[in-house]
Image (cartoon, rainbow, N blue to C red):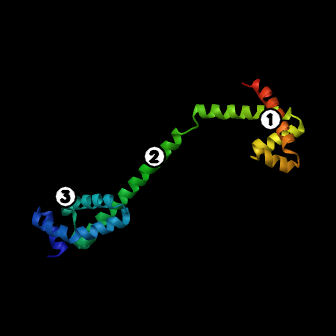
């Protein structure tokens, strides 16, 4: 029996006709839904909803307007598109809520302000060092050079660089001690 005849019988409440119709259209319905929805679990759910809707609304089928398979696939396509739109809208709502609720925390702002003040204090204390001390400390602590590498870059004996670093760090500690 063809899908058109089966659908007319399903509209009359014939369960055996529905079983036969189910066998004919369930594969194409799932395939179409799967192409639209893409997620296998969601596709199975949507296909199930479509087949349930088919049982409930078979009386709305008008054979004069097209084939039963076309009608069923139209139902499936509409339901699949509705599911995709619903999922997209839910995702967009979640993103809007996430953006709305994620301003910088008070502690984060306070930490940034404090770090800025500390940087300024260190700059002022570095300015109080001699040029030679500042150069040695900057190379070691900001540029990441070892004492030996600082000595090589400045073409100075290692002992001289160590003395400058010790004196410079002592002056920085004394200066920054007032910041704490």
Furthest toward the bottom, the residue is 1
Residue under label 2: 94
Quadrant of res 54: bottom left
**Residue 159 falls left or right of residue 97:** right
18 lies above or below 102: below
**Of callouts 2 and 1, which one flags the residue occurring earlier in the amino acid sequence?**
2
Q: Is mark 3 on a helix, strand or loop?
A: helix
Mark number, residue 123? 1
Q: Where is residue 175 in the image (x, y as percent from the top left)?
A: 80, 27
**Of callouts 3 and 2, which one flags the residue occurring earlier in the amino acid sequence?**
3
Q: Where is residue 52 in the image (x, y as percent from the top left)?
A: 21, 58
Mark number, residue 56? 3
For the residue pair 41 and 116, the one nearer the viewer reads as: 116
Quadrant of res 117: top right
Mark 2–mark 1 CB contact (< 8 Å): no
**Of callouts 1 and 3, which one flags the residue occurring earlier in the amino acid sequence?**
3
The quadrant of the picture occupied by the N terminus is bottom left
Q: Circle 3: is it few (<14), some (14-19), or many (20+) Cα within 10 Å?
A: few
126 lies above or below 94: above
The quadrant of the picture occupied by the C terminus is top right
> Is residue 30 in view from this perspective?
yes
């Amino acid at each position: 029996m063809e899908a058109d005849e089966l659908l007319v019988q399903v509209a009359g409440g014939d369960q055996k006709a529905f079983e036969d119709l189910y066998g004919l259209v369930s594969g194409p319905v799932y395939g179409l839904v799967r192409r639209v929805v893409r997620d296998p679990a969601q596709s199975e759910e949507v296909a199930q909803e479509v087949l349930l809707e088919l049982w409930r609304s078979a009386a709305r089928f008008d054979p004069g307007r097209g084939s039963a398979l076309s009608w069923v696939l139209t139902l499936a396509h509409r339901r699949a598109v509705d599911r995709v739109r619903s999922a997209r809208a839910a995702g967009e709502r979640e993103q809007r809520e996430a953006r709305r609720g994620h301003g910088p925390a008070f502690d984060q702002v306070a930490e940034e302000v404090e770090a800025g003040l500390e940087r300024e204090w260190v700059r002022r204390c570095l300015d109080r060092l001699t040029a030679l001390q500042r150069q040695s400390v900057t190379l070691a602590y900001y540029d990441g050079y070892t004492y030996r590498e600082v000595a090589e870059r400045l073409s100075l004996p290692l002992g001289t660089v160590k003395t400058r670093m010790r004196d410079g760090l002592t002056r920085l500690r004394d200066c920054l001690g007032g910041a704490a």
